[in-house]
Image (tube, rainbow, N blue to C red):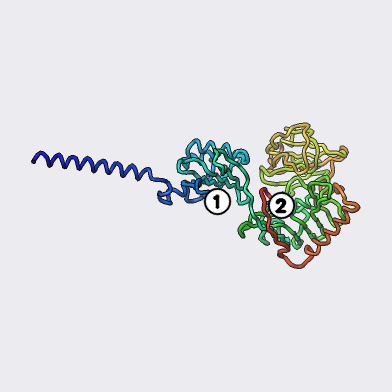
Amino acid sequence: MNNIFPRIILLLSVFFCIFLVAYSWMSDHRSPETSSPQNALTSEQADPTGNQNIEDNTEYPVEIKPAYIVTGTIRSGETFDHAMDRNKLDRSVKTQVIKGLSQVVDFKKCRPGDSFHISLDNAGGLIRCTYKKSPLEIYTLEANKDGKNEFNAFRDSVLLECRLIKLSGIIDGSLFTAFSKIGANSKLAVAFADIFASRLDFNTETRSGDQFDVIVEEYFKDDCFVGYGRIVAARYKSHYKNFNAYYYRPRDQTEGKYYDSAGQEVGTSFLRSPLPVYRLTSKFSNRRLHPILKVYRPHHGVDLAAPIGTSVMATAAGKVSFVGWQKGFGRIVILKHPGGYKTYYGHLSRFAKGLKKGISVRQKQIIGYVGSSGMSTGPHLDYRIKENGVFKNPFNMKFKPKSKLAGMELDDYIEKQEYWRQFLENDSTHKTLQVETRKITEYPDGWLG
């Protein structure tokens, strides 16, 4: 008897150990559907960039109901592949996601703040991946519902509310400050200035007390502002002249333009300035004391001070006749234009990528960046224009409109212009004119952001 009890105790101990091992194994291999919500729903709880993760509102068929949902955000200096690695996604899933979404997403342009949401089945297989670049730009890779191991990639449609509003303001300082005071962002101010860039230089020709009005599309998603659309009409009342612009698309053209009250295109063949914002530090002169050489000599251009790296635009369409280093100008671009014109852009810090002699450039195309190369006392652009071999003061030159409406097109335009003019001239400073809902799969026409 004395020998039996130790054997019984030993057997019971063995059975108890086997039971503990089995229980532990079962706990570690429970179905993901029964694991804790904290572990199953997400691998990243917080989005440090403020870009909200995508909610999964998809109604899945029972057979593909997700068991795991992994959410994440692209961090600074990280690729989408690295972000999935950080979230410990299986290599086969990563390959499926990148291969599938690459049909609609350029992952070379991933930015910090982009977010993703990946749904997996019980076996860890991919069901669906959503990649969000902005509230308006969401892409989805989704398994076919027929059960085959195939996936479809597409850009999601987004429901937006478009509000057509009128904004008005008064200049007290700069145009950008005035737009900020009425609650508008700098993108709208830049677009407004760009419309009149051929007729009005907002750096030198504005005064405090000047007034402006703009009718523009504002887009909202779930009652949150997401960006500006097209400027429909604009007016600037300066101390010496009124400028008006109305968007109109002629029937035989795919894109619209801005026209003035007489039906002439607001844009001319040359911009007033190659820089959107600058400070005039030296005027056109036949006799100027050179700041470095300390001798009097002609200065057949204008010096426009701006921070190093500021984009420099071609003031007119043309061809590159010279790009490189030239004596006191340092890095310089020279463009040749129709009608016997040449423009010069000196003291650049660098040239635009791909710019070389002989290529054509568009008006407003970036050709270089402000610098202080060559004989220069500080960062600025030396801008010059030559007409038939003679240098002219860029700020005194007048250019004709690119086009003018006529006939039935002009009649149709005048009718539309009268409709918008009544709102522009209304005394209200902030008024909603129209509201409509739009379902989009790409950025709206005229999108400013």
Element class at badge 2: helix
Which residue, given by chain and number where applicable, does mark 2 sit on? 190
Horizontal side of residue 22 vs 136, given as left or right: left
Q: Residue 324: where, in percent of width, then height?
A: 73, 32
Vertical order, 147 against 358 (above or below)? below
Element class at badge 1: loop
At label 1, the amino acid type is Thr
Q: Nearer the viewer, residue 17 or 263?
A: 17
Q: Residue 22: where, in percent of width, then height?
A: 30, 42
Depth check, mark 2 against mark 1: the one in front is: 1
Q: Nearer the viewer, residue 288 or 391?
A: 391
Q: How crowded is the residue under tag 1: few (<14 C-alpha within 10 Å), some, or many (20+)?
A: few
Horizontal side of residue 400 vs 437, given as left or right: right
Which residue, given by chain and number where applicable, does mark 1 sit on? 58
Residue lying at 78% horizontally and 64% vertically, measured from the top left: 423
Q: How much space separates mark 2 and mark 1, taking CA atoms?
A: 40 Å
Q: How crowded is the residue under tag 2: few (<14 C-alpha within 10 Å), some, or many (20+)?
A: some
Residue lying at 48% horizontally and 43% vertically, measured from the top left: 121
